[in-house]
Amino acid sequence: MSAATLPRAGTTVSRERTEKVRGVALYLLKRAGLLAFVLWGVVSFLFVLARMSGDPAVLFSEPDATEEQIQLTRERFGLDKPLLEQYFSALAGALRLDFGTSYTFGLDAAALVAERMALTLQVLLPGLVIGVAAAFIIGIYAALKRSKARSRALMSAAFLLDGIPYFFLALLLVLVFSLTWRLLPATGSGTPAHTVLPIAVLALSSVATLSRLVRGQFLDVLGEGHILMARSKGISPVRVLFRHAMPTALPPLISFVGLLFSISFGSLLVLEPIFNYGGLGALLVRSVTNRDFPVVQAGVFAIAALITVINLAVDAIVTLMDPRLRTKVAK
């Protein structure tokens, strides 16, 4: 065989790399299809649930309204159309992000949800970023200094803090910082000061949960053979941590951060009524009470879309970081 007919090493490597990228892209495309399926299921479930809970036209009519007046209300909100037509109209509206007009506020439901979602994210994102950063610092320190008294004290504090329900922690912070010391407003929204206590609750809850997982993950990784080999060669501890231990320890922790986003979002929706914070949680509580179906549908759709997109992004990051997963999805 002549040299001209021999496969070139560079060509083979390039072909393998292309196949891996194609496999990862196909994997992410499948996940995107799952996103569409989840959102379709959410819209369908909300449509059925809204029709099972009663006739909104009766709710928004006067107590002594006649049947003709109730029928006019039903026609106003499009509730007089056949059920199948209403369902396909709801699906088409979800594709356009058009969920109708709020029965209570008289405003576009999607715009109202987007406004309140922005207020919720002003608390959620800082709380999660602060909590995750602090958890990694504490967890890595506790793993590196596991025999020190300070490390054990930090983990004991995280364990005790993790046992406190987040709503009880919120009440404790209000009692200390608002009612006793009068440093921060207890309830309300509209200023940065109103976001401090909700952010603190989310951050403390994230630190309590994640720091112990970070410590355990890094303890496992630091005990592996290649890490011990790197240490025996005299490589500096900082380089061992960031170059050898971090790439192995990070993928499962990043996956949990995606789950922590969903948990924190759900917690904040409960915390907002406690703090009387005018975010999406408070809006949904009021809308469910008033059976304001367009706002409920728009709000739940937005939550499902956001959480699913975050999980899709986390999956993509973990897949690109972990060579074992890249090899698996490329097959």
Image (cartoon, grey):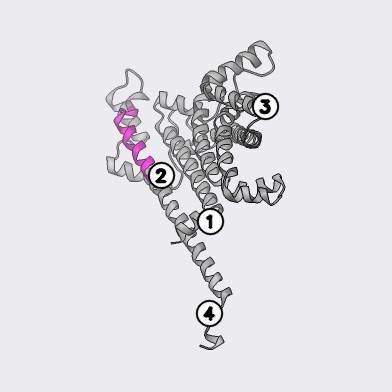
Mark 1 belongs to which amino acid? Pro
Marks 2/1: CA distance? 30 Å
Q: Locate residue 328: give its quadrant.
A: bottom left
Q: Earlier in the sequence, mark 2 or mark 3?
A: 2
Marks 2/3: CA distance? 47 Å
Tag 3 and tag 4, C-beta contact below 8 Å: no
Q: Would you name the residue on which mark 2 appears? A: 39
Asked which secondary structure carries label 2, the reply is helix
Q: For the residues carrying marks 2 and 3, which lies nearer the camera in this image?
A: 3
Residue 150: assigned label? 3
Q: For the residues carrying marks 3 and 4, which lies nearer the camera in this image?
A: 3
Q: Would you name the residue on which mark 4 appears? A: 7
Marks 4/2: CA distance? 47 Å
Which residue in the rendered view is the most extreme toward the bottom? 2
- Magenta residues span 38-57
Q: For the residues carrying marks 2 and 1, which lies nearer the camera in this image?
A: 1
Residue at left 65%, top 51%?
230
Mark 2 belongs to which amino acid? Leu
Taking the image as shown, residue 265 lies to the left or right of residue 141, namely left
Q: Earlier in the sequence, mark 3 or mark 1?
A: 3
Marks 3/1: CA distance? 36 Å
Q: Would you name the residue on which mark 1 appears? A: 323
Q: Badge 1 local density, few (<14 within 10 Å), some, or many (20+)?
A: few
Tag 4 and tag 2, C-beta contact below 8 Å: no
Residue at left 34%, top 28%?
56
Residue 112 screen position, x and y as percent: 51, 34
Magenta segment main secondary structure? helix
Marks 1/4: CA distance? 25 Å
